[in-house]
Amino acid sequence: MERTLIIVKPDGVQRGLTGEIIARFERRGLRIIGMKFMQVSRELAEKHYAIHQGKGFYEGLVSYITSSPVVVIALEGTNAIQNARNTIGATRPHEAAPGSIRGDFALEVGRNLVHGSDSPENGVIEVGNFFADSELVSWARNNDSWIFEK
Ligand code: IDP
Ligand code: MG
């Protein structure tokens, strides 16, 4: 089963949207295996956004994600990457579908509320960057068989 790292970014926490955002993934059926409230260090931000180094928005992106606390959530489920990204909506909020998190609550790409991993490989890597193995819980949910067919 795929894993994805979700981050409720500083704007989501500051705007009091943490619960609203988590609820959407929870209702979607993705299973929470880790969650914590934390301040992202510059070092961790640079690791997480290494692929964007050198781009014009990179410095702004690192200062955005380190500006204030975030909530990080590790989720697993069938096609967790794409299912979560659809729930999040397009990177640029004016292109995000109504009903998605960004389509409902955001206006600008630099204040787009939430991160979700972009591939199964990166899902595993990013969950490992933000969580120690001891912080992840492997568990069977009561309603798993009503969400996962197999
Ligand atoms: P994603 O978050 O939808 O996966 P990415 O292309 O991976 O989008 O970009 C990472 C983050 O960098 C975005 O969520 C957004 O916060 C920021 N970002 C991307 N493009 C721009 C831009 O053109 N201006 C400002 N910030 C940007
Ligand atoms: Mg991305």
Image (cartoon, rainbow, N blue to C red):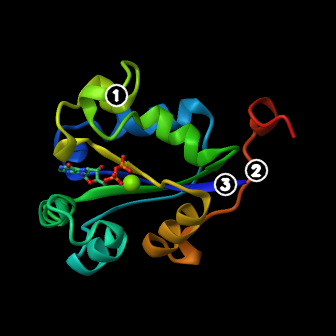
Q: Is residue 56 left or right of residue 89?
A: left
Q: Position of residue 146 (x, y in %)?
A: 78, 29
- Does label 3 or label 2 sit earlier along the sequence? 3
Query: Which sits in the foreground, 51 or 19?
Result: 51
Q: Amino acid at mark 3?
A: Glu
Q: Residue at x 63, y 63 (%)?
A: 137
Query: Which sits in the foreground, 58 or 123?
Result: 58
Report which residue position mark 3 lands on.
2
Q: Is residue 27 left or right of residue 79?
A: left
Q: Secondary structure at mark 2?
A: loop
> Contact, CB < 8 Å: mark 3 with mark 2?
no
Q: Secondary structure at mark 1?
A: loop
Image quadrant occupied by the N terminus: bottom right
Q: CA distance from mark 1 to mark 2?
A: 33 Å
Q: Residue at x 57, y 42 (%)?
A: 82
The correct choice, above or below, for 23 with respect to 115 in the image is above
**Numbered badge on residue 96:** 1
Q: CA distance from mark 3 to mark 2?
A: 15 Å
Q: Residues within 10 Å of mark 3 (few under 14, many from 20)?
A: some
Q: Quadrant of residue 58?
A: bottom left
Q: Residues within 10 Å of mark 1 (few under 14, many from 20)?
A: many
**Numbered badge on residue 140:** 2
Q: Is residue 134 left or right of residue 129?
A: right
Which quarter holds ligand 2? Answer: bottom left
Q: Secondary structure at mark 3?
A: strand
**Numbered badge on residue 116:** none
Q: CA distance from mark 1 to mark 3?
A: 23 Å
